[in-house]
Amino acid sequence: MAQRYLGLRMRVLLSAYACEPNRGSESEVGWRWALELAAGGDDVWVITRSNNREKIETQICAKRSNLHFVYYDLPLSIRKLKKGRRFLYPYAIAWQWGAYKVARKLHRAVRFDCVRHVTFASLRIPGFMGRLGIPYIIGPVAGGERAPWRLRRDYPLKGKIRDFLRDVAAASIHVDPLVRANLKSAQRIYVTSEESLQLIPRKYRAKTQVRLAIGIESVVSPLAIKSDRLRNPPRLLYAGALIYLKGLHLTLQVLALLQHKVPGTSLTLIGDGPDKSWLQNIVRELSLEAYVRWLAPVDREQLLGMYCDYDLFLFPSLHDSGGLVVLESLSRGLPVVCLNLGGPGVLVDSSCGRVTDAHASQQEVVRRLAGAVSDIAALSASSMRQLRTGALERARQHSWEHIVAESSHREPH
């Protein structure tokens, strides 16, 4: 991997508030970026939270000697601000400012060649590392992903309120002086979706590119694919949080429509979350009890082994910046049906699944999703084999090594 770059060994500083092995989501992003940058041959220093220390230290002894961690946290009185997320913004600013002061002192001793902000992975959270006076890279970060208004119709009330407040927070990027100063100081900016690119002020878009923040470690061999045909009836899978923003109310309406198109189609939901009872009510209203299976959350290794037991991964998430479960399913040869929103809309194409346009009425979007599933269910064995092979190839294109190399501090060969 070190050969993929031109130039001499560099000293790189990484700002990664969330950075923890085997945690998933944003913590996994911080951890994997730290590992991959170090694997490129450079000296990498990471500033992260103190409460990540124990898990990092148990892993790092077996990793590279050119990877160093510096731990910083705010006083307990300030850490309490983030509980309930009501005061997350001031808490995040306070942590970023404190991390900058740590970085400034560290820079005097180490003399870094560049600095990169990875997590918090949100455009709405400003950083201050651009003040170090060295090349500064932001991202990949998210923040512009939003659910179309017409798909919020059946949200629970709290979901409608939260998404409205999220829209307001995203719009504030254009008037927030700290965010604008952060973007201005960056040499390069990477965002996770076209929606986030459109959120960047026009004057900074020339130095901004769309790049996913997530990657995958391994992809199974095509020989591991057990069958070329979908089961009859097909078995659909969802894995993740049971929360309104994942579009699961749409998923259940799709399942109801499929009972007329592909009778007997079933859905397994792996996960838990605050909206489980809301979703269970929808299942009863649609008389889907016989076709929906609820499973408790499982660890990541167990989940990776379960993908092959299903035929399609149905994931109509409404503002997911990454969608790691989508990438995991592709890495196991499981095609995906999703919306053209956020990270899943970037990950999935016709070679590995179906991407449905989300900008229509809710009834029409549900109809399109159901049509995508039934179309795949009708594929021949050879076409299905091609789709499964395409899923594996798409996953390979998003290996961690490839993702980090694409938006590195160095230019690739």
Image: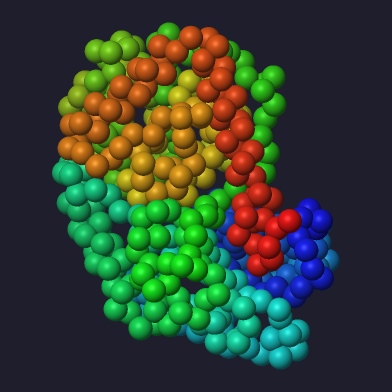
Q: Is residue 57 left or right of residue 169?
A: right
Residue at 17% from the left image edge and 51% from the top image edge: 157
Is residue 206 in sight in this rendering? Answer: yes
The quadrant of the picture occupied by the C terminus is bottom right
Asked where in the image residue 242 lies, by quadrant, the reply is: top left
Frontmost residue, 259 versus 410: 410
Frontmost residue, 92 versus 167: 167
Residue 252 position within the rendered picture, expressed as x and y whole percent measured from the top left: 28, 29
Count of labels shown? 0
Residue at 75% from the left image edge and 89% from the top image edge: 109
| 284 is higher (above) or lower (below) than 260 | below
| 85 is higher (above) or lower (below) than 398 | below
Residue at 30% from the left image edge and 54% from the top image edge: 146
Asked where in the image residue 315 lies, by quadrant, the reply is: top left
Is residue 20 in sight in this rendering? Answer: no
Residue 403 position within the rendered picture, expressed as x and y whole percent measured from the top left: 62, 52
Frontmost residue, 227 versus 112: 112
Residue 64 position within the rendered picture, expressed as x and y whole percent measured from the top left: 81, 61
Frontmost residue, 242 versus 113: 113
Residue at 70% from the left image edge and 58% from the top image edge: 412
Residue 405 position within the rendered picture, expressed as x and y whole percent measured from the top left: 67, 56
